[in-house]
Image: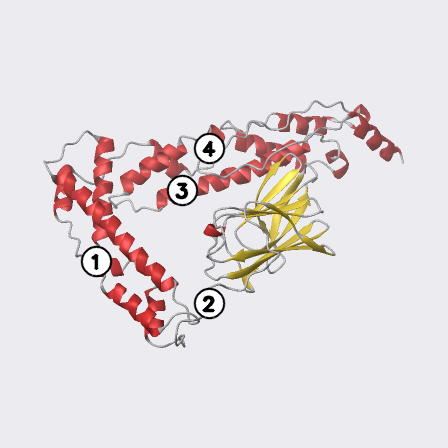
Amino acid sequence: MTNKKRLALLALVAVPSLLYTTPATTAAATDFSNQPKVAYIYDVANYNSNVANVIQLISNINNTTASFQTSLESALKAYNALNENEKQYVTNYATLSYHQQTRIAYRKLAAQIEEKLASVESTSVNYYQNVLETRDWYNTLNAAQKTYVSAQTQKILTSSILPNTSTDKVVNKIKLLNSSRTNFHKDVADARAELNALRKYSNISLPSGIEQLLLDAEQLVVKDKTVAKEVENAIKALSPKTSTAQDVQAVKTAFEALTPVQQELVPNVWTLVDYVNGKYSLSKNGNGTKTPTLSDTAAEPGKTTEMTKSKNTYKAKINVADSEIDTERYVLTTKANMTVIIPPLETLLNEDSGVMDIQVTRNLNRINFQATLNKKPVKYEADMEIVIENIPSNSYIVRIDEFGERMPADYTIDGNRIYIQTTTSGTFQIVRN
């Protein structure tokens, strides 16, 4: 009973206002300087030197300096050494939790930088350019973030480096460009990369007419991509319900008119092969309709729509068809402090038309989110978002996989709102520290 009274007293005199945001892991450096700073009044009767030491260690953490890692580890070690009763009086524990989330974001950011540097072989003509780009990114980091980048990567990014080429090599490469070769596009890209690398290193001067040869080649690349895209779209437009044998023949003729280089740029050529080989039963007269059956109660793009409710489940429909606006997002609201934001249809990776079903169920702290099109899982290129309001300030989100295991989830925190980001359906759980 005495302990409860002391806890009650502590709650009255030491109630911090905690507000933090999950660190963003973007290509630019992330600002984590606005961490919680709260003044506390302590219940001296329940306050000892061990607790005081932990509180001080947490207060000493600065997530922008090179000492961040060691300071955080020291604070965590000291906190974990406390007994359960002592831990209750660490009144700035939320700040420690905040820094742990920051550490996760810094590790992810460092991994992204190292992946970019490793994405180009050191013997490649593009290696120099890649190092410069990665170095520019690395230089945007603060001192704490840099400590999570491996020593080997830091050495490369902070040392001088020369391009793997010379003016003579670049000139010769440009002169040998041949639009009839199957690797023409790669040759053009390599020549441009080498030229850019040399120009970053020194003020070189090419012989008269050489750079124009490269510009002309780049224009041919643009043309190749344009005509190949037209054929790709024509293949996508084929449908067993609406296309005739004549339609298939027309697309086949268009494909055969492409050069070998252009044909290599048509990714769905095997779909055309299936049509030509008779895999699909085609329409006899082409009188089929290209308009799928759509919903009369579907959400409207660019507007806010209230989802229908059945017990703890909220549902909405979205029409997916060529006739629909594909540049506006969908905002779907509920009466359970949740909002679902669906990105524009132009970022939808599914190629089907029809009605997309959106469903979100919340049971206590678990949220199950489903998005399907013609009963198949939906995948977006952009993020779908689930916005949850009025959450405890010391909460974070995990993703539950098919085996029930907790996995990291992409999310941000803004005040008392959590924004869960996902490109697919999934199950998420709100966890309190």
Q: Is residue 8 left or right of residue 284?
A: right
Of the numbered discs 1 and 2, the one sitting upstream in the chain is 1
Q: Is residue 58 left or right of residue 287?
A: right
CB atoms of marks 1 and 2 within 8 Å: no
CB atoms of marks 4 and 3 within 8 Å: no
Q: Is residue 244 left or right of residue 392?
A: left
The amino acid pointed to by label 2 is Thr
The amino acid pointed to by label 1 is Thr
Residue 267 in view in this figure: no
Of the numbered discs 3 and 1, the one sitting upstream in the chain is 3
CB atoms of marks 3 and 2 within 8 Å: no
The tag on residue 114 is: 3
The amino acid pointed to by label 4 is Ala
Residue 94 appears in which quarter of the rendering?
top right
Of the numbered discs 2 and 4, the one sitting upstream in the chain is 4
Measure how far apart labels 2 and 4 are at the Cα level: 51 Å
The amino acid pointed to by label 3 is Glu
- The mark lying in front, picked from 3 and 1, is 1
